[in-house]
Amino acid sequence: MATHTLRQQLFAEALGTFFLVFCGTGAIIINDISAGAITHGGVALTFGLVVMVLIYALGEISGAHFNPAVSIGFALAGRFQWSRVPGYVIMQFVGAVSASFLLKWLFPSHELLGATLPSGSAGQSLVLEFLLTFFLMLVILQVSQGAREKGITAALAVGGLVALEAMFAGPVCGASMNPFRSLAPALASGYFEHSWIYLLGPVAGAGFAVAASRLLHSSSVNKQS
């Protein structure tokens, strides 16, 4: 298996996060300006498909995290060096923000640029974001090898789950599951009122998923012994 340099891995994280935010929030923007031509289901499918394709394309290089909550989750699980987390997070931020400001240039009249907003209470969206990211990180830990999401199993499972969760929870909380997917359009649009929900919920959900994964694996070990 080819060994990739840290520079290549960081570039892959920036590039992957760029396309995730560009395609996903771009679908929201275009759906808004085209009177719903893409539809909510189409937006959810866009997020799932871009995640699936990016895992196929870049998973062998960087592990296809594209999400600071995932990088932190892998580090908490002992599958990723904490010393590498800052570099990954910085490049994910650069990729996400670059995508949102490009979308702002392309669609200057769009007010929110695909920002995630709760349709109900803040508490409701916080719980949903926690649970959505909990299940996402749990699935990632189950189908990945080390800190790498790669191969057909990971791509289909993770991409499918992203689409599923965005499909049913998107109308309520936005189904972000990724702090930078929410923070980037907030920076570009200047709308920060609910950003804390999408920073706290996903990171906490990923952390609890690590604990749940350990419990699942320790239970199976005990049964075999």
Image (tube, grey):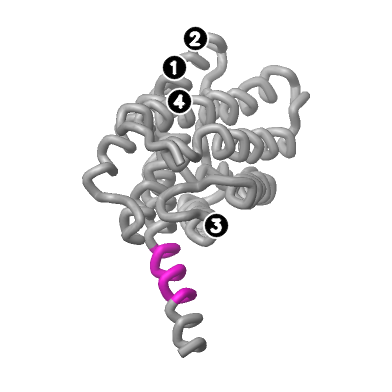
Is any part of residue 199 visible from this angle?
A: yes
* Front tag of 2 and 4: 4
Q: Which residue is mark 3?
A: 143
Residue 181 image position (x, y, % from top left): 47, 35
- Circles 1 and 2 in contact, beta carbons < 8 Å: yes
- Which amino acid type is shown beneath numbered disc 4? Leu
- Residue 16, disc: none
Categorize mark 3 by other alpha carbons within 10 Å: few (<14), some (14-19), many (20+): many
Categorize mark 2 by other alpha carbons within 10 Å: few (<14), some (14-19), many (20+): few
Between the C-alphas of marks 1 and 2, the distance is 6 Å
- 186 or 210, nearer to the observer: 210
The structure residue drawn at horizontal position 56% and vertical position 32%, both measured from the top left corner, is 57
Categorize mark 4 by other alpha carbons within 10 Å: few (<14), some (14-19), many (20+): many
Between the C-alphas of marks 4 and 3, the distance is 23 Å
Q: Which residue is mark 4?
A: 15
**In the image, residue 208 above or below residue 28:** below
- Which amino acid type is shown beneath numbered disc 2? Trp
Range covered by the magenta-colored residues = 208-217
- Which amino acid type is shown beneath numbered disc 3? Val
Q: Is residue 128 left or right of residue 197?
A: right
Q: Which quadrant: the C terminus?
A: bottom left
Q: Kindly report the secondary structure that dominates the magenta region of the rendered protein.
A: helix
Q: Which residue is mark 1?
A: 101
* Front tag of 3 and 1: 3
Q: Secondary structure at mark 1?
A: helix
The structure residue drawn at horizontal position 32% and vertical position 32%, both measured from the top left corner, is 5
Between the C-alphas of marks 3 and 1, the distance is 33 Å
